[in-house]
Amino acid sequence: MGDDPVTGDIVPGGIEAQTHRAILNIKACLLAANSSLDKIVRRRIYIMKMSDFRKVDEIWAEYFEEPYPVSTCVQVSGLAKEGALVELEVVAQA
């Protein structure tokens, strides 16, 4: 999710800022587990508006190289935090 790791608040700046923050949060978690972004084998995107999918995918491509992991995108009616527009879930190798 695109929340600030210090405050826990959703970052301002819309879908783009939230996607960047979510990827950076994932990166930090993976590094803490002795893994890395290039070890991701599966991603799930939960998104409020399917029209934002292209933006999320373009930002994803800034952090990853092909071949990209298997991916699913699901439009949802709400996410766990007020103001959240996107949530990313990944599975990575150790």
Image (cartoon, helix red, strand yellow):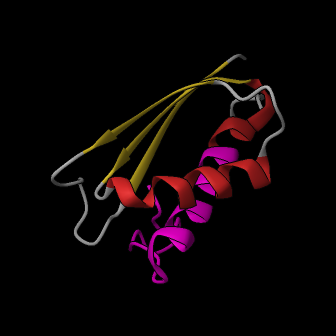
Where is residue 87 drawn, in percent x and y? Answer: 40, 49
Q: Which residues are magenta?
A: 1-28
Where is residue 60 drawn, in percent x and y? Answer: 66, 50
Is 28 in front, or is 59?
59
**Which residue corresponds to the image point at 75% horizontal and 39% vertical from the top-left?**
31
**Which residue corresponds to the image point at 41% horizontal and 68% vertical from the top-left?**
8
Q: Residue furthest top?
A: 93
Quadrant occupied by the C terminus: top right
Report which quarter residue 38 is drawn in: top right
Is 56 in front, or is 63?
56
Residue 76 on the magenta span: no
Report which quarter residue 48 is drawn in: bottom left
Q: Residue furthest bottom?
A: 12
Residue 17 on the magenta span: yes
**Which residue corresponds to the image point at 62% horizontal and 63% vertical from the top-left?**
20
Task: Using residue 68 as the reference point, say whether residue 38 is left or right of it.
Answer: right
Task: Using residue 66 as the reference point, say whether residue 32 is left or right of it.
Answer: left
Compared to residue 41, the image places residue 60 above or below, namely below
Where is residue 81 drawn, in percent x and y? Answer: 25, 62
Quadrant occupied by the N terminus: bottom left
State how many labels appear. Answer: 0
Q: Residue furthest right?
A: 65
Compared to residue 59, the image places residue 7 above or below, namely below
Where is residue 13 drawn, in percent x and y? Answer: 49, 83
**Which residue corresponds to the image point at 47% horizontal and 62% vertical from the top-left?**
2
